[in-house]
Image: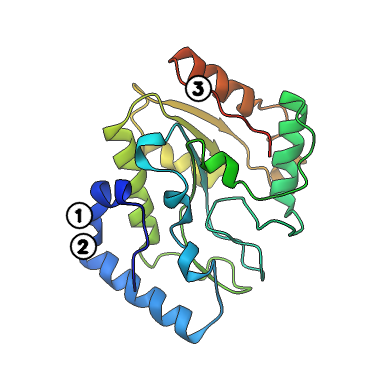
């Protein structure tokens, strides 16, 4: 299977691509896409990296799995294609954005404009079989995306990591907190948000404050 990933990431991750686990993973993904309907489409599996070059990474938002319904996933965590109904977690992300920064609730759920500004929208697992959440977990993707987080941590500084929910918080151990900023909150899913663990975290304004503190251009969160 062709690894369609930006050259800036290829330089950083080429040792991963040569590992036996990654070759086994690619063989698994190729077979899954051949025999089943899977998401995102093959050309978009590495979209998070292709819209956010390694050199431009300023913020990392970690998700778990791609959306598994038809037409939703586009290779960016929490993002959906333009014109697709916003899933519940994305609705709550946009509500917090509105409360935090006064940004009107966006019509489009496509988060590509964030990625283009240096927000790496990274799912821990980059593919999924249609209508089967978690179906591609524990096949090697987590090892790969953990390596991505470790590489960012070791090779960059002053990156803001947004860890939303228990799964993402477990990734904190991969991050050197002496040179990066880690912001944590509950997950934006209704289960967590309705219990008071999401709304009011002000992560969008806090991210920009942290970026400005280290003389980085803040993110324009408008869509």
Q: Residue 216 location in percent, x, y?
A: 46, 20
Q: Examine the image and state in which quarter residue 149 appears.
A: top left
**Image position, residue 112 (x, y; %):** 58, 47
Upstream in sequence: badge 1 or badge 3: 1
Label 1, label 3: how far apart the Cα atoms are: 31 Å
In the picture, the quarter occupied by the C terminus is top right
Mark yes or no: residue 136 visible: no
Foreground mark, 1 or 2, reads 1
In the rendered image, which residue does mark 3 sit on?
217
Secondary structure under tag 1 reads helix
- Residue 206, compared with residue 213, is above or below; it is below
User: Foreground: 42 or 168?
Assistant: 42
Labelled disc at residue 19:
2
Report helix, strand or loop for mark 2.
loop
Q: Which mark is residue 92?
A: none
Q: Are marks 1 and 2 in contact (CB under 8 Å)?
A: yes
- Name the residue at 24% across, 56% down: 16
Q: Is residue 174 above or below residue 83?
A: above
Specify the quadrant that holds the N terminus: bottom left
* Disc 1 + disc 3, Cβ < 8 Å: no
Q: Residues within 10 Å of mark 3 (few under 14, many from 20)?
A: some
In terms of image quadrants, where is residue 85? bottom right
Q: Nearer the viewer, mark 3 or mark 2?
A: 3
Give the image location of residue 188, x and y in percent: 67, 43
Report how far apart the C-alphas of labels 3 and 2 lie in the structure: 36 Å
Residue at the spot 46% in from the left edge and 84% down from the top edge: 34
For marks 3 and 2, the one nearer the N-term is 2
Q: CA distance from mark 1 to mark 2?
A: 7 Å
Q: Which residue is mark 1?
A: 15
């Amino acid at each position: 299977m062709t690894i369609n990933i930006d050259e800036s990431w290829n330089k950083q991750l080429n040792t991963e691509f040569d590992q036996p686990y990654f070759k086994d993973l690619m063989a698994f993904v190729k077979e899954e896409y051949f025999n089943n309907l899977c998401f995102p489409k093959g050309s978009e599996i590495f979209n998070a990296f292709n819209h956010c070059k390694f050199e431009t990474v300023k913020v990392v938002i970690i998700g778990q799995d791609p959306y598994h319904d038809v037409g939703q996933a586009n290779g960016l965590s929490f993002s959906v294609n333009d014109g697709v109904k916003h899933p519940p977690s994305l609705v709550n992300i946009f509500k917090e954005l509105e409360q935090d920064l006064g940004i009107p609730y966006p019509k489009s759920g496509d988060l590509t404009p964030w990625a283009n500004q240096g927000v790496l929208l990274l799912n821990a697992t980059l593919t999924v079989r249609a209508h089967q959440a978690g179906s591609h977990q524990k096949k090697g993707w987590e090892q790969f995306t953990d390596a991505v987080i470790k590489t960012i941590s070791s090779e960059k500084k002053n990156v803001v990591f947004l860890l939303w929910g228990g799964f993402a918080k477990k990734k904190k151990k991969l991050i050197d907190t002496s040179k990066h900023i880690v912001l944590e909150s509950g997950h934006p899913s209704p289960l967590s948000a309705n219990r008071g663990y999401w709304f009011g975290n002000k992560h969008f304004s806090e991210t920009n404050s942290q970026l400005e503190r280290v003389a980085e251009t803040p993110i324009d969160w408008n869509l």
